[in-house]
Amino acid sequence: MRIVHIYKDYFPVLGGIENHIKQLAEAQVQRGHEVDVLVTNLDAMYAFETINGVRVTKVPRHLNVQSAPIGFSFRAAVERLTTGADIAHLHAPYPIGEICNLISGRARKTVITWHSDIVRQKTLLRVYAPILRRVIAKTDVIIPTSEVYARTSPWLRGHLDKCKPVPLGVDVTRFRLSRGAGEQGSEGESCNPPLPRSSAPLRLLSVGRLRYYKGLDDLIRALPQLPQATCVIVGVGPMESEWKALARQVGVTDRVTFAGEVSDEALPLYYQAADAYVIPANSRAEAFGIAILEAMASGLPVVSTDVGTATSWINQHGVTGFVVPPRQPSALVEAVIRLSDEPVRRQMGAAARARVLTNFTQDKMIERIEGIYRSLFVA
């Protein structure tokens, strides 16, 4: 098949959706498909490259409106690349890509992976809503990343007949068990930059773009009540300065490390060096959480919040970790204290890894998506 993935960014830009598209596109090339990726460039220049067999087209970026980059030549690029293609595979939310494909898409079939609703950009959504309804109506298949998100999305719950959920997956061969899961792992000294040495017995980790909905301010506010814990935060983003200031304000700068952006090669070492993973999300914008799977694949128990999305389905309360209410630092404190018990951590970490191996591997995800593609051409 000839497949065109359409989104706003691609590798080397790091992020959950960007990493997913790269993983999917490269696997599809390995399966013999012809794969293009269309995104915007970080500047006002065209860029064309082939990365691991994937042809990547980056059109000039001229404007950025509420996190949606706009390239004036994007529509023409959609028309050119989708002409003769079997599948146009959009990754939502990215209104510009969806609009351009609606107007000028020429692929035989259109598929959308629905990573998240538009949550925060209320003004944009009011303007975009009528177009989004047309996009949904014209799409052949919508792939939510979980059934629970499809059922609770105001946009998808009326189109469940068109939805075929496929959970995201990870390459489990990348992730060895953490030291807390019973295998000898890295103590962190081999990470670049090195993780700090600490006498605190419990090392917490959180990974992802530093956006408001990650809720890491609640974790920072919890730390004064957790003197037995340190925290490493991997990632960069718009909330970095504010959260660093908060750490100074509540007096925990000596126990919070902002590790910045970490390469794909180094990232597994951070999981190996941790004892537990914490993602205190406060919004439906945290629709799935691929880093949760990475942590679980590494044998880490997880503390997550119930925001009505897949996070509370992936992380099973009392089995693979704990699920607590959002925006409640005191609930995070209680959950982390329970994970201070090493046998509890080991048991939950083992259950976490087993759950990923059973349900959330990259191979399972790739095969499910390819099955959806094939089904579209069955008479």
Image (tube, grey):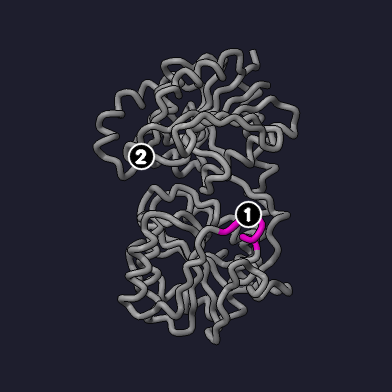
Q: Residue at x 53, y 54 (%)?
A: 314
Q: Is residue 59 above or below residue 338?
A: above
Q: Is residue 88 above or below residue 190?
A: above
> As shown in the figure, which amino acid type bears the numbered disc 2?
Ile
Q: Position of residue 246 (x, y in %)?
A: 33, 70
Q: Which residue is mark 2?
A: 118
**The one of 339 and 55 positioned closer to us in this rendering:** 55
Q: Quadrant of residue 96?
A: top left
Instruction: Work out how far the residue at label 1 is from the one at label 2, CA to CA, in angstroms.
Output: 28 Å
Q: Position of residue 145 (x, y in %)?
A: 52, 41
* Circle on res. 28: none
Q: Are marks 1 and 2 in contact (CB under 8 Å)?
A: no
Q: Residue at x 38, y 48 (%)?
A: 284
Q: How many marks?
A: 2
Q: Residue furthest front?
A: 45
Q: Quadrant of residue 202?
A: bottom right
Give the magenta range.
262-268
Q: Which residue is mark 1?
A: 264
> As shown in the figure, which amino acid type bears the numbered disc 1?
Asp
Q: Residue at x 38, y 81 (%)?
A: 225
Mark 2: which secondary structure?
Answer: loop
